Every structure is written in structure tokens, then in C-alpha cells.
């Protein structure tokens, strides 16, 4: 089990101030960039748990939360998240370092963040003039194949319901491929 807590101090805009500025008639649309203030604080936490049930089967879960008051600009715009999943090592098919897995993820936004986007505000990733809010729900399945030493490749499939938290969008499917390199090449030998 791992816990994470964070506090960011930065020049961030505030969602509620941007909405209030729009509703008062001061701005033609909600614009968080007009309400940036040096020294704002964004804080949150995360919790990750993993448990091996057998030598081949592992389950995992994650939750995360941030205050959702100030703009996100360093990470994906998620104020609440929960994930549960499992993976199975390839011992059964004689590929002990391979694994196949699946996970379900639900992401959400704070009330202020939702209202800002619903009124036409734009985030650094989200916003298209309106928001019919719904939790972003993702089913993910993947296969990771060990190639050599610390090199592995993975194929990943995601089915996303309400992408960008908008019930007017999707569902959509995403396919991706990754390469992971970790201590595959003994760099200390290359320097000699």
C-alpha cells in the first residue's frame, strides 16, 4: 500500500471566481486565465493498494482526490478518481514475465470545475462550449510482453464512456502501444 499527498503552489485561476465573473457580466464567457493569482494552492491525495493473491494473480486499486477549486494545468483534468483491476502473469503459457490485465476506472470533476465547463469555460484539455456532465468511465485491457532483459512492449485497449466528462460525447475506443526500457543496457560497461 502506498499513500501520496501533494500541495502545489502556483499561478492558478479559480473556477468559482471565473464563473462569478461571467455571471456578474464582467466577462462574455467564463475565462479562468483572467483569475490567475500567484500563490494559489491546490492540494490532494492518492492511495494505491496492490495484493498478490497467487504467484500469478494480482489485484490492485487506486483512489485520488484534489480540492477541485483551482485550475489543473500540469496533469489531466481529474478531481476525483477510483480504479480497480487485476493482472495475471503468463506462467500458464510459459511466459512468466508477461502479463494480461484489465481495469475499470471512474473519473470525476468537482462541482466548481463542472459548472465552469458547463457555462462554456475552457481548461487546458477540456471544454468545447458546453458540458452535459457524466462520470468518465473507462474499461481497460492490456497485454505486456517481455522481450529481452528490461525491455517489454504492451498493447492496450480502452473503452471510454462519457469522454471528457460529457454525456454528449462517445463512447469511444482507444488502442495504444508502449515500449518500456528499464536497466536493459548495462550503461556502466559502455563508459569503459
Image (cartoon, grey):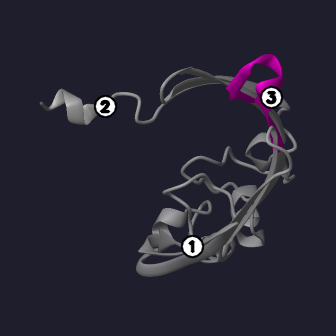
119 lies left or right of 136: left
Q: Which residue is mark 1?
A: 26
Quarter of the rendering containing residue 63: bottom right
Q: Is residue 83 magenta?
A: no
User: Which secondary structure lies at badge 1?
Assistant: loop
Of discs 2 and 3, which sits in the foreground?
2
Q: Is residue 48 above or below residue 182?
A: below
Quarter of the rendering occupied by the N terminus = bottom right
The earlier-in-sequence mark between 1 and 2 is 1
Please tell me how crowded label 1 is: few (under 14), some (14-19), or many (20+) other residues with Cα within 10 Å: few
Residue 16: x and y, percent? Answer: 65, 76
Residue 157 visible in the picture: no
**Real-space CA distance between mark 1 and mark 2, rounded to the nearest whole angstrom:** 61 Å
Stretch in magenta: 86-99
User: Which secondary structure lies at badge 2?
Assistant: loop
The earlier-in-sequence mark between 2 and 3 is 3
Amino acid at each position: 500500500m502506498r499513500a501520496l499527498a501533494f500541495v502545489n503552489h502556483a499561478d492558478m485561476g479559480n473556477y468559482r471566481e471565473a464563473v462569478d465573473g461571467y455571471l456578474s457580466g464582467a466577462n462574455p464567457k467564463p475565462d479562468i486565465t483572467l483569475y490567475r493569482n500567484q500563490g494559489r494552492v491546490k492540494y490532494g491525495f492518492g492511495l494505491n493498494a496492490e495484493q498478490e493473491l497467487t504467484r500469478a494473480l494480482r489485484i490492485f486499486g487506486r483512489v485520488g482526490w484534489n480540492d477541485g477549486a483551482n485550475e489543473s494545468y500540469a496533469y489531466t483534468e481529474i478531481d476525483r478518481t477510483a480504479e480497480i483491476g487485476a493482472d495475471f502473469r503468463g506462467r500458464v503459457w510459459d511466459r512468466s514475465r508477461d502479463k494480461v490485465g484489465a481495469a475499470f476506472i471512474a473519473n470525476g470533476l468537482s462541482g466548481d470545475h463542472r459548472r465552469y465547463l458547463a457555462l462554456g469555460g475552457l481548461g487546458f484539455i477540456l471544454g468545447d462550449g458546453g458540458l452535459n456532465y457524466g462520470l468518465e468511465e473507462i474499461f481497460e485491457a492490456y497485454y505486456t510482453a517481455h522481450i529481452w532483459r528490461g525491455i517489454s512492449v504492451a498493447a492496450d485497449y480502452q473503452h471510454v464512456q462519457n469522454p471528457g466528462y460529457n454525456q454528449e460525447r462517445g463512447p469511444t475506443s482507444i488502442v495504444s502501444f508502449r515500449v518500456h526500457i528499464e536497466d536493459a543496457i548495462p550503461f556502466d560497461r559502455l563508459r569503459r
